Image (cartoon, helix red, strand yellow):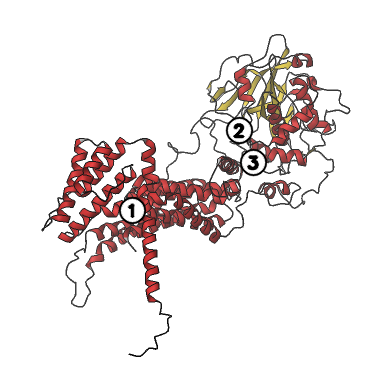
Amino acid sequence: MSGRARLALCAAAATLMASCALLPLVAEPTWLLQLIPLVAVQTGVGAAARRVPLGRPLTVVVQALVTLVLLTLVFAREHAIIGLIPGPDAFRHIAGLLQQGSNDVSEYAIPAPLTDGIKLMLIGGVLLIGLLVDTLAVTFRSAAPAGLPLLALYSVAGGLSDGGADWLWFLVAAAGYLMLLLAEGRDRLAQWGRVFGGSPRSPGSPEGGAVAPVRTGRRIGAVALGAALVVPLALPAMQGGLLDAAGTGVGAGNGNGGTISAVNPLVSLRDSLNTDDDRQVLSLRTSANDISDLYLRIVSLDDFDGTTWKPAQRHIVGVPDRFPTPIGLDAGVKRGMVTTAVSAASWYAQDWLPMPYPPSDVRIGGRWRYEPVGMTLVGDHGQTTRGATYQVTSLDVQPTAEQLAGAPEPPATLKREYTRVPSSVPKVVAQTARQITAGARNHYEEAVKLQDYFAVSGGFQYDTQVEVGRGPDAIANFLKKKQGFCVHFSFAMAAMARTLGIPARVAVGFAPGTPQADGSVTVNQKDAHAWPELYFAGVGWTRFEPTPTRGTTPSYTLSDTPGTSLPDQDLPSHQSSTAPSAAASPSQSCTPELVKLQGCDTPSAAAAPNSGGGGTGPWWYLLIGLGALVVAAVPLSPLLWRMRVRSVRLGGHARTEEGAVEHTLAAWQELTDSAWDHGIPSDESLTPRRAAARIVELGELDPATGAAVHRVADSVEQVLYAPRPRPAAGAAEDVRRVIEGLRGTVSTGTRARALFLPRSSVRVLWAVSARWTALRTRVAAAKPSLRRPSQQQG
């Protein structure tokens, strides 16, 4: 095995060894078995490209393209062109899987289930690291910087894991890196020839001095690994600093002490609804006469990517003394002032401050910042709501149905931002929205019809443990199964409203709590809630309540639909529905933790989309990778063959007269073939001198390049006609100068054809035809004669 091939093998092994640090992050290690053949194919492609040889940048490009094909075959072959070539659908599917993986990473605790999205992030990330390592260590022959991507891979794994076996994975990753360094060192030493190691130490000892540097490197590596593992144990612990987990920026919470720090408010919401311990979160005292509309809003989710809703990246400022009037609220809309004093539990640590909407003034101590678009407060440098006491003055906006129905069109910029619906959302969502709102005369009536469909007439049931799948099909599955909790109802109504041209977003917070005998209001964990907010010009962002048996239906949306959309007064807002479900309920032994990890059979299990990629053995992926390699090589075969031939013709040669003669003739052949590729066909009837003049004239070459053509022709004439040939040196450099000159005088199309479809590649067919003819001739000559011998005598 050559030194470079050994180095490529060590680079692949180092990547796989470093990727083992990711094993504790997921529950199943099967992704590593699928990864091994993919890394092998990626490494083999690099080795083949360097063997051709291709240029360094082109080698990296070929490896990247094959890596993309491999990911397409594994994760999006149903969406690819002929099951192989990634097209727009394949890219959209992969992007959806990446988004799903990002959501799964933020939702699940370690070890997380091996969902398709997480698997794509793991395998795709390691392949990217493998490409970087192979490029640095093998293609550019610099193994030391290749440790940086390996370190990044280990650091990601070490930062997310619980630290129980970090030392083991560090040992494995570091051993792979040292192996890579030793392989490079051995390859460099081999280029110097035999290493003198001194005389044998004893008369009977063998000459082993040549391996002394390698043995010394191994010893140094072992000592370095031991020091890296042992020395930190003797150093004092360092707390705080720039990389400390707590207090590192806006909205950063440490999450200790049993808190439900809502880095992802939706995850916190679901955990709160499914908790067995319905603890008190907030205690309120308010001046409002009717607390049924006293929703405490935490944050608004206005960025919809087709899979989920999340807060958009907004600019934050200092908390103003007096908040501005909410956007879109006109003076003609009735309103009142409400003052609410809030006390947060000592265990409840939330980055955003729960407040009635829209707030006008907030009195609170600590480090808080204001986000003007959502009118929310977010903690700064680790500030949370833990044990906070604050007072909020808010507006009690009371629009009428007539005002909402007569609302004009919203501003174009706002409508464009808040009615954006990704193309990945199934068409059934918009179709259902149009069917439900048929006959509505304005956006207000459409919104009321949507609300009534979910809360009253659509046959939906409230269930906090139902699963409707993930990804773009989640809303469609919810509309089909008609089971879910507030997240599903608010997401679906907001998305459908956007398809109708109504600006919409989702608010997360708490539904109205439970009044107490002392006049206070208690808000518990199960009061966590999500609801849609729709924008109407003149009124602003307006709350709707599509979730049955939760919260209260706004008075301005009560319709004449038979029945009532008001919740059962016997059921407090933090209680889920007690009505029997139309489908079988999960087993009583199925805990919320198992439901979260999809470990229970639920009625919606069949609705989860199957993205493929599961249950396929690694050998199948190896065959797919080899097939992809073959398919990718077919259209590039003329280019690769031509580059290989040019490299051989202009490469090194024996330092003898015969070697110089062969090199000169090969250089002349390369010059004439390159001229042919660029539109100047060769003429075998011409002498080298006449052929050179023809190439200079037809190629419109400058004097310096023309002189290079004539120097090569003169060398050929020396070889062909001189009694003692003395060809001039530098023929290869002259040919390369001529090729560059030819490229500069032709059109872009001609240059592209000369690169990808060179005319001289027809010599391959000529060679095959000549060999076939020669083979037939030899076979015919070897056949015994079938003629009977003559019987004539004498």
Say above or below: 84 vs 2.
above
User: Is 472 on the left or on the right of 162, as rendered?
Assistant: right
Residue at mark 3 to residue at mark 2: CA–CA distance:
27 Å
Quadrant of the image containing the C terminus: bottom left
Residue picked out by circle 2: 350
Residue picked out by circle 3: 471
Find residue 105 and report its image quarter: top right
Say above or below: 527 vs 467.
above
Amino acid type assigned to the residue bearing label 2 in the image: Gln
Residue at mark 1 to residue at mark 2: CA–CA distance:
63 Å
Q: Residue furthest left?
A: 724
SS label for mark 3: loop
Q: Position of residue 62 (x, y in %)?
A: 42, 48
Amino acid type assigned to the residue bearing label 3 in the image: Gly
Dot 3: few (<14), some (14–19), or many (≥20) neighbours within 10 Å? many
**Of callouts 1 and 3, which one flags the residue occurring earlier in the amino acid sequence?**
3
User: Is 383 on the left or on the right of 180, as rendered?
Assistant: right
Dot 2: few (<14), some (14–19), or many (≥20) neighbours within 10 Å? many
Residue at mark 1 to residue at mark 3: CA–CA distance:
47 Å
**Are the residues flagged by discs 1 and 3 in contact, CB closer than 8 Å?**
no
Amino acid type assigned to the residue bearing label 1 in the image: Arg
Q: Position of residue 301 (x, y in %)?
A: 63, 29
Q: Nearer the viewer, residue 314 or 527?
A: 314
Q: Residue at x 82, y 22 (%)?
A: 558
Q: Position of residue 405 (x, y in %)?
A: 76, 16
Residue picked out by circle 1: 644
**Of callouts 3 and 2, which one flags the residue occurring earlier in the amino acid sequence?**
2
SS label for mark 1: helix
Q: Nearer the viewer, residue 400 or 284?
A: 400
